[in-house]
Image (cartoon, rainbow, N blue to C red):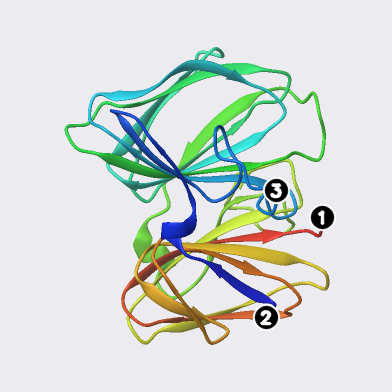
Amino acid sequence: MTIEVRPFAGLGKFRIDWLNATHHFSFGHYYDPARMGVGPLRVWNDDEIAPHTGFDPHPHRDMEIVTYVRKGAITHLDSLGNQGRTEAGDVQVMSAGTGIRHAEYNREGEVTTIFQIWITPRTRGLEPRWGQRAFPKADRAGALVPLASGMAGHDGALPIDQDAAVLGATLAAGQSLTHRLAPGRQAYLVAATGRYRVNGVEAAARDGVVVRGEDAIRIEALEPTEILLADLPPG
């Protein structure tokens, strides 16, 4: 099959008092040798973070870490002195490079939900960096907008060191769009909300959808849908 839907209920689960996490790929205590990533896409975590809690300082290196905030806000602090608050619908990117320590806190009075997306870089040992950007949902109505990208022509996106892109769109019920894939490329789709079809195959919010061997991806919204699509090289 060129379209594989991985239902949310069957993904890896991790639960503690402040964190309700679902892992699309092997991560932490969840291991499935058949789900180690798609190309350079190594991690897609669906995290629900309780109010006034979060991830205390911890290190990373040689990873492009994209955070998409679905609800609430996340507050970032790191060893480079960066700090910032990223709200729902917006994106932050941390390139861990030679090494960085960071913390991610929910300082809000409500649960914050995020997609945490890790992509392996083309180059090891880069200078670490962090950035954030607002991407109003109205600007994504009916069209995929590059949010984080290392691909040519995506000048408005937050930069990552990989021939890959994370794009986002919002679709009204009955609305559709088509995304072209270059030969040999593949994609991974996850909807934050809604229900939709990918080349005729139905998927629901928070399911993972792997697309391989297709030259085009047609997304049809069956109800209002907020979608992220990772356009990925082979591997």
Look at mark 3 in the image and give the residue it sits on: 33
- Which amino acid is tagged 3? Pro
Which tag, 3 or 1, sits closer to the chain's start?
Answer: 3
Q: What residue appears at the point 54 percent right and 12 percent down from the top-left corner? A: 79
Where does the image place residue 26, in percent across and percent down from the top left? 61, 43
| Mark-to-mark CA distance, 2 and 3 | 28 Å
Tell me if label 3 and label 1 are in contact, CB under 8 Å. no
Q: What residue appears at the point 37 percent right and 74 percent down from the top-left corner? A: 195
* Badge 3 density bin: few <14, some 14–19, many ≥20, Cα 10 Å: few
Which tag, 2 or 1, sits closer to the chain's start?
Answer: 2
Looking at the image, residue 139 sits to the left or right of residue 95; the answer is left
- Residue 140, label in figure: none
- Residue 235, label in figure: 1
In the rendered view, tell whether residue 148 sits above or below residue 144.
Answer: above
Q: Secondary structure at mark 1?
A: loop
Look at mark 2 in the image and give the residue it sits on: 216
